[in-house]
Image: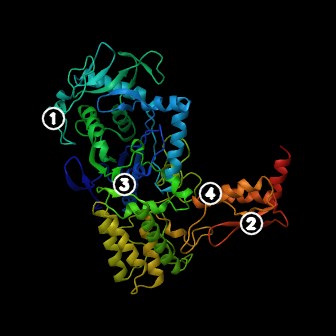
Amino acid sequence: MSLHLRDTLSRAIVPVIPLEPGRVRMYACGPTVYRFAHVGNLRTFLIADLIRRVLLYHGLEVLHVQNITDVGHLRDDSADRGEDRMLIAAGLEGRTSAEIADGYEAAFHADAALLNLLPAHVFPRATEHIPEMVALAERLEDLGHAYATPEGNVYYAVATFPGYGMLSGNSLDELRAGHRGDVEPGKRDAADFALWKAAGPGRALAWDTPRWGRGFPGWHLECSAMAMKHLGPRFDIHTGGEDNVFPHHEDEIAQSAPIVGGPPATIWVHGAHLLMRGRKMAKSAGNFQRITELVDADLDPLAFRYLCLGARYARKLDYSETSLASAAAGLQSLRDAVRRLGPPPPHGPWAAPEPIRAGAAPARPIGLAPGPSGHGASGQGHARATISDRAGTPAAPLSPAGGRLHAAFVQAIDRDLDMPAALRITRQAATATDLAADERRWIVLDHDAVLGLDLDRVWADGFPAPGGSATTDGVDEASGRGLPDRAAPLMTERARARAARDFARADALRDELRTLGVEPIDRADGTADWRPVQAPTARSERSRKRSSNR
């Protein structure tokens, strides 16, 4: 296996050499669920998805953990001051912090599914790991790396860790010189950061501790504690955005190193910002956009994935109507080229290679999900049962020319995820005149295990037709006339399910519509029509009887 990644810690491109042969353990910094994730966040989460797909393509098992921050994310992270963002959102929206967390976490999983992100195998939540965080802070205090103040705050003493600043390149003198404002009471050094904060009177989201009274964790503590619990003291890869380098990941290393004997992750991978109108995408900057807005605008959300694949993850990417339209056109042209090759045979050497299907995680995933597809495998029917080295040993009898394309693709993805080059090679394979159609189709579909563009679905009913896209607007005025009262919203919901590629839900809605005497018709342009059901099917008759007996 020859995947190489850009390591922020060593400032070099290094090979991925699993600590445990045949298995890679990876931690990805996840969302803080006090608001919706925007497409800039999703670009960062895509890095872990691509790494995981490449590792699976090489036949390696992956254990992927992504945290859910639902407490302790302070408004002023640089100074460990201010209100918890979860509580701010709860106050603004008139809901409890638990309702805020559950609602925005569910939205995050739905948004990730629209981008074909493989759901993690474990989604640990901060509020469910308070004992582990308290125990870690106590160990650091016992080792002399942390101290408690009379107010009940616990700070990490950065001067006790000689390696502080190794990830970000900061020095303690520079950090102290750059500190602004008053130093918090009891804090020995302006550069020290909070492990635990004392809770004020009546504060929600607070817990009792044996040593320091009632309080809540600092933001950085959660990732150290949860990574240790779910991945062990040392693991292979840690991902995040470039804004996580300092202070979050710098502090995470400082917290973990005294316990585990060094940086917890071997390789630290960080993605560059997504820019909109020249500025980092952020809600505070007024340039915030969700992936669902693409669906509302009749755009395939995978056009955004295609846009991200067209740039290296460590480089800033411009997001605009123009760049997105160009990506949508590029995706459509690739799909059209694949569609023209015709569907693959059901059997034989050129049968479609097995896809790495993302699926959709439930609104609140619980526990450890087995298998390559993580929490997305439940009910999908597409989880790969076996893992094989597809990069080293292609399953199809490739010709010399096809073998060269395959080797070039593997070289590109192994070269620090050079997805622009990988995408170019895939497009070249789709139109290669020196290859038979069967071989071209097989190569492209095999590449899509890494690209994640749903290229194997171009022949499916309801998939965007050549030069078009599926609609999410439901039925039009003409086709809506005469619908039973209960059927119209079901038709609209089914159109949205088809646009989101949730075909299981679309099929369930079709059955429900049939019980109302409505037979949906999926038109070639992606919209939906209907006709009256002449005779109910046996299944719909059973459903009608069940409904009438309620």
Marks 2/4 in contact by CB < 8 Å: the verdict is no
> How much space separates mark 2 and mark 4, taking CA atoms?
21 Å
Single out the mark in the foreground, 4 or 1: 1
Relative to 175, 473 lies left or right: right
The image quadrant where one finds the C terminus is: top right
Q: Position of residue 100 (x, y in %)?
A: 53, 34
- Tell me the residue that label 2 is attached to: 478
> How much space separates mark 3 and mark 1, taking CA atoms?
31 Å
Looking at the image, which is closer to me, 120 or 101?
A: 101
Marks 3/1 in contact by CB < 8 Å: the verdict is no
For the residue labelled by badge 1, is the local secondary structure a helix, a strand or a loop? helix
For badge 1, the amino acid type reads Glu
Please identify the quarter of the rendering in which residue 422 is found: bottom left
- Tell me the residue that label 1 is attached to: 174
N-terminal of the two: label 2 or label 4?
A: 2
Single out the mark in the foreground, 2 or 1: 2
Looking at the image, which is closer to me, 469 or 377?
A: 469
N-terminal of the two: label 4 or label 1?
A: 1
Single out the mark in the foreground, 3 or 4: 3
| Residue visible at 39% across and 55% down in the picture | 52
Relative to 27, 354 lies left or right: right
- Tell me the residue that label 4 is attached to: 497
For the residue labelled by badge 4, is the local secondary structure a helix, a strand or a loop? helix
